């Protein structure tokens, strides 16, 4: 890599849901810049929409090539990233095992049940009386119940696996030793459920995965089965648990937007897309891609063997793609955001997350149109030491 000064990255600690202004400067003046993450070798950082899409979608950039390298990262130890560390065809082989459970058609079949769950949770919050914590009453239990139902995991175990899942998104919130303990616990728990499925077959996703493994061992090894299932359980709820309160926070701190959504509930689907674009869920970049040959990105030559990280949130504010990108437009007519990623690693659960976010907003609009923050905004507290941004609690009244 050329001997250019690498800027410490991330540029600043996460500040609520604000995006560091440095990204706008880089998109304008230096769309590909050298950065140094807390650990690992220096990397290029892509900030423009077109460049981010290219790095995520071009097969000349490899996740698997990070194996054996001192990959740029936010944690001292290098962690096994499972399917997220694979390239096709290995990645494709594993993804096919679960992809049909997350199609738009299958997710729509889950919508009525999700509506019932959301209705029950919001009713419970109302019964508890204001002020109430939206994180505790709604945002945490809803994605957990949905992924438990889909996978076939006992929701009664949620306190255990929700705690262990923090290891997947922790940077400094957990010590390396505690993070490894939690990952080991999660994998051991899932291995136990796999054995249960062998003894008593079921029609849920985990049961289907076990049948695939046992009928065709070439498609899925035992370790891959357990790792894939554990990853689905953790990622299938952890990000949405944080994103629900993030979206509600944005709406309640922009009360004119909440009022518009209540007046025009038909806007909910486009509002979810706009809020996904606007909210920088990630606290930093992760999962570097290595160039397998010399590639020009944004007018800069990335040499073979050099890693690139991308800022999806900077890409989602790119003035070349989005008119007035720092303004919330719940009816934005064209919205090619990449909040769920792009290319072969596009989030397999994107349709599920969309549906859950839509259902939560629809339920809150219907049941609590007077929703508002129950404390001054500066008193809200935010999680730290994670790959994602999120509120520790969101006290609301209605």
Image (cartoon, grey):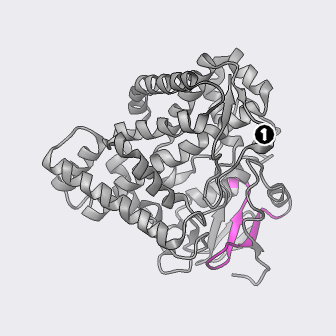
Q: Magenta residues?
A: 30-50
Can residue 64 be seen here? The reply is no
Q: Residue at x 64, y 35 (%)?
A: 273
Residue 302 rendering spot, x and y as whole percentages: 67, 73
Residue nearer the viewer, 261 or 166: 166
Q: Where in the figure is residue 1, as x and y percent of width and height?
A: 69, 81
Which residue is denoted by mark 1 in the rendering? 377
Q: How many numbered marks have been drawn onto this rendered protein structure?
A: 1
Q: Is residue 173 visible?
A: yes
Report whether 65 appears left or right of 188: right
Magenta segment: does it hold 242?
no
Q: Which percent across, then down, holds residue 31?
A: 78, 62
**At 64% from the left edge and 68% from the top edge, which residue is drawn?**
308
Mark 1, other Cα within 10 Å: few <14 / some 14–19 / many ≥20:
few
User: Does 168 appear above or below 306?
Assistant: above
Q: Is residue 31 magenta?
A: yes
Q: 291 or 148: which is nearer to us?
A: 148
Vertical placement of 156 versus 371: above or below? below
As drawn, 382 above or below 220 = above
SS class of the residue under badge 1?
A: helix
């Amino acid at each position: 890599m050329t001997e250019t000064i690498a800027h410490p990255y991330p540029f600043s600690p996460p500040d609520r849901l604000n995006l560091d202004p440095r990204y706008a400067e880089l998109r304008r003046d230096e769309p590909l810049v050298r950065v140094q993450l807390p650990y690992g070798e220096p990397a290029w950082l892509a900030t423009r929409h077109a460049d981010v899409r290219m790095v995520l979608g071009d097969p000349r950039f490899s996740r698997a090539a990070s194996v054996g390298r001192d990959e740029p990262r936010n944690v001292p130890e290098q962690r096994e990233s499972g399917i997220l560390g694979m390239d096709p065809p290995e990645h494709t082989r594993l993804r096919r095992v679960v992809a049909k459970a997350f199609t738009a058609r299958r997710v729509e079949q889950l919508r009525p049940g999700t509506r019932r769950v959301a209705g029950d949770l919001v009713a419970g919050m109302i019964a508890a009386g204001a002020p109430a914590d939206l994180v505790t009453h709604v945002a945490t239990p809803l994605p957990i119940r949905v992924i438990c139902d889909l996978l076939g995991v006992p929701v009664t175990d949620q306190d255990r696996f929700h705690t262990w899942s923090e290891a997947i998104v922790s940077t400094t919130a957990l010590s390396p030793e505690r993070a490894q303990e939690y990952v080991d616990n999660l994998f051991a728990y899932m291995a136990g459920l796999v054995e249960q499925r062998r003894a008593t077959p079921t029609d849920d996703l985990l049961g289907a995965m076990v049948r695939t493994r046992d009928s065709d061992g070439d498609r899925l090894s035992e370790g891959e089965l357990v790792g894939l299932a554990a990853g689905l359980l953790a990622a299938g709820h952890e990000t949405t648990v944080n994103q629900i309160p993030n979206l509600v926070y944005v709406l309640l701190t922009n009360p004119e937007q909440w009022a518009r959504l209540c007046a025009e509930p038909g806007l909910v689907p486009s509002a979810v897309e706009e809020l996904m674009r606007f909210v920088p869920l990630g606290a930093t970049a992760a999962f570097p891609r290595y160039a397998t040959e010399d590639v020009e990105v944004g007018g800069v030559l990335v040499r073979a063997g050099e890693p690139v990280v991308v800022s999806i949130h900077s890409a989602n504010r790119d003035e070349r793609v989005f008119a007035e990108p720092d303004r919330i437009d719940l009816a934005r007519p064209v919205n090619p955001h990449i909040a769920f990623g792009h290319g072969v690693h596009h989030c397999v659960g994107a349709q599920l997350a969309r549906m859950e976010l839509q259902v939560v907003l629809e339920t809150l609009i219907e049941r609590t149109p007077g929703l508002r923050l129950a404390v001054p905004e500066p008193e809200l507290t935010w999680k730290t030491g994670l790959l994602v941004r999120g509120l520790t609690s969101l006290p609301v009244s209605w």
